[in-house]
Amino acid sequence: SQTKTPSKVDNMFQNYSHSEIARDTATIKNSVIMHLTATFLRTPTSMDSGHAYLASAFSVRDRLLQRWNLTNEFHDRMKAKRVYYMSLEFLIGRTFDNALLALDLRKEYGQTLGEVGFRLEDIIDEERDAALGNGGLGRLAACYVDSMACSDYPGWGYGLRYKYGMFQQQILNGYQVEVPDCWLDSPNPWEFPRPDVTYPVKFYGHLVRDPNNDDRYIWESNVVYDAMAFDVPVPGYGTTNVGNIRLWSCKTNSLFDLNKFNSGDYGGATGGQVAAQILTDVLYPNDNTNDGKELRLRQEYLFCSATMQDIIARFKKTGRPMSELPELAAIQLNDTHPTLGVPELMRILLDEEEMSWDDAWEVTTRTFAFTNHTILPEAMEKWPVPMLDKILPRHMGIIYKINLYFLQAVEKRFPGDRDLLRRISIIEESNPQQVRMAFLACVGSHKVNGVAAIHSDIIKQTIFKDFVRIQGEDKFINKTNGVSPRRWMNECNPDMSDLITDVVGDRSWVNDLAKVKKLEERVADEDFRRRWWDAKQKNKQRLAEYILTTTGIQVNPNALFDVQVKRIHEYKRQLMNILSVIYRYHCLKQMTPEVRAKELHRVVIFAGKAASGYWVAKQVIKLINAVAEVVNADEEIGDVLKVVFIPDYSVTAAEYIIPASDISQHISTAGTEASGTSNMKFVLNGGIILGTVDGANIEIGEEIGEEQIFFFGCLAHEVEDFRHYLRFNQPKPDDALQTAFDMIQRNTFGDGAIFQPLIDSVVRGGDVYLLSVDFPSYIQAHNAVEDAYRNREEWITKSILSVARMSKFSSDRSIQEYAEEVWNIEPVRVTSCSMGI
Ligand code: B1N
């Protein structure tokens, strides 16, 4: 191929990158029409809202790609150190509105679309969520790449491009039904295929020792899949920087067997393709559980191998020796799911780069850092040694050796402590043996962090206790989670955001959340307080409409909106919430109509998906819907109490629900929710928390003041004793809880027998999540919430003060802490003149 003349290329690129993004509506209209006609073969007269969305989105994307090219080229030239955020999940949601706001083109596109007869809001609604994640962990990854882009940190996300994302949830007869999420059926403007960025990934096979090098093996296998890159741009707000999420997709073309095809074996001809494609076909719909499927292990390896090959290929272009990798790359492991990156980097350094073991290990541990997101035992990843040995023989050998050297070093420092060695071994001596991925991630990293202060303390006292003693206190740190103010304030709550902008003077608070502090100055301003309340009312009105279209239930926007939306899990205790609703229903039924009419009106809103195989969680959904059906149809009750289960909770649904909540519930058993992030989103939108002393609730309380949050329930350090007691003694439900059980058993909500297992999980199953312990204080806390809400002026004060004091929970703060204390990277600001250097 021809070589380029660098100066000529530079000039071209410089001109291109200098050209400012066109903002005049004539140019915008032209580019929309161009895509409509040339990309989608439509005409303005035959344009429906679906094509109006696609044409507008492609037009916005053109503008984004311009900056995106510039960003990556600039970071390459500056030889900037980059962080790579490795995550099996990126719960991105929609991109169109986010990109419009980042590029400051919302008004212009709104006007352009208006001229051809569309409302921007309707066009935005045409976009499908990119739902490549389950819940908090995947959404955190999306917020973090957003913050990297907005804070000018050179960073990329790496993940998998699942053909089917998180399943869609339908509710049939009160039960969850899962429907595949075919999100790629229509064109996706927000991905950029990179057929030239494709790497081979090997499985199975056997090893041949290098006779000249003890550390080196040759791995021979003819099971080779191709991983191809798709790049997803991450628009930076208030900066020309555009981030990137590189997602791998399994390519199958090379696996088509022409010989079989020619001999008439059509099924056999595509058999290899089917087997390969399945690797990136579907996201495992588990949140906080690990079901240990072999296919998941192969997904994880495909992801890790392609990512490590890509990072190393990029590093090699700098011409620097491999030993300097940690100077140019930091890799963050989002939980243990990408931990195979550690032995994969070792394999490449040993077998392909021919480094010595010690040098390779030094490079590896200086490059990786690891975030733990859960201590639930059922979520801990462990892979059977025979399975790993079969699929990844070289990696199994490397893991054994990592473990051997680690145990030898520990034995030296703590001679004779056999029990210590058994406890910390990366290989669990069970039958069959298992690889403990959290220990491998820990040993392979220079920093390990939890996601909220209490969680980071707990992991130091439990799963990593021995490691703290062996590897030192300094390795184990806390990085409290955060959320993006771009999506979770500015985008989802425009009215409140305009109010904040009024107070701050401009919109700079979106990238510098400390500025919301200024709201405190206005807490006594009557006019401001009224506008604050009205903004919330408008959001509630909008949610009421959303509820009507998604469930057919009519709710009164003047009622208290009481919200619990998150994955359905026993530890999150949606069961306790619905039991309290049942008790409230009972109390209302006891009242005379006159007394009842004076009660505070309340809409209790639930949403969330249950993992497909999680039977108890699915029964909880059924119970919620069964209660809703009876309560909502009870004419005596009317608007005093409504119960709603919004189907198919998603990022987009959250953007409707969160800004509209008065009170939100974060009621996990103390010590079980690592952090929670929706708790932050609710408070950032002027909602109040009813919660346990758990996860980030604690730090939120510290920041905003205990008058602004309703805490209840036992404390984390008391949980063990309660559980111990309940293993040997029947729990004693208080009258309220007993009343709720009785009503279910008396078939108030349909056949009570189907809910007996839920009751049994409390009264016979040891009440692991301590519902019977926390129920009395939970009911009391509900009463306190009612009293507070009745005092509207006090409530408005709480709401304003909360938002004003929440700046700690911006993901920009989290990312800055990671950058400074873990990654050792600095912001690199790309300006349109930057290319002139
Ligand atoms: O990660 C979030 C936290 O805010 C939540 O408290 C925590 O529950 C969540 C296996 C997980 N921890 N572990 C998972 C997800 C998928 C999977 O296959 C585990 N999710 C969390 C962000 O830190």
Image (spheres, rainbow, N blue to C red):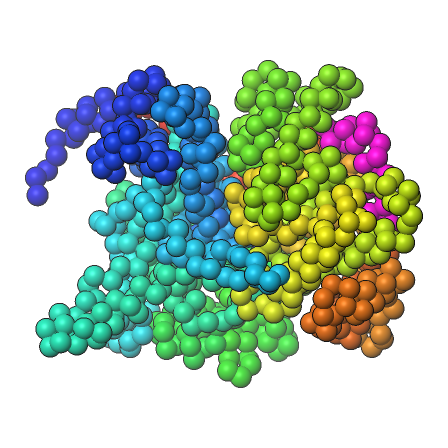
Q: Quarter of the image containing the N terminus? A: top left
Question: Can residue 333 be seen in this snapshot?
Answer: no
- Is residue 195 depicted above or below 42 in this figure? below
Q: Residue at x 34, y 65 (%)?
A: 278
Determine whether 272 is above or below 154 in the image.
Answer: below
**In front of the other: 318 or 483:** 483
Tell me, yes or no, whether the highlighted magenta stretch contains residue 791.
yes
Q: Give how far across and how far down residue 707 sits, in percent.
A: 82, 36
Question: Quick one: which residue is furthest to the front in this view?
Answer: 635
Please report the bounds of the magenta region as a residue range. Answer: 779-801
In the image, residue 579 above or below residue 22: below
Viewed as shown, does residue 520 lie left or right of 713?
left
Q: Is residue 403 above or below residue 42?
A: below
Horizontal side of 291 relative to 54 (left or right) equals right
User: Regarding ligand 1, which quadrant of the image does it lie in?
Assistant: bottom right
Quadrant of the snapshot with the C terminus: top left
The image position of residue 437, as x and y in percent, is 51, 66
The overriding secondary structure of the stretch rendered in magenta is helix
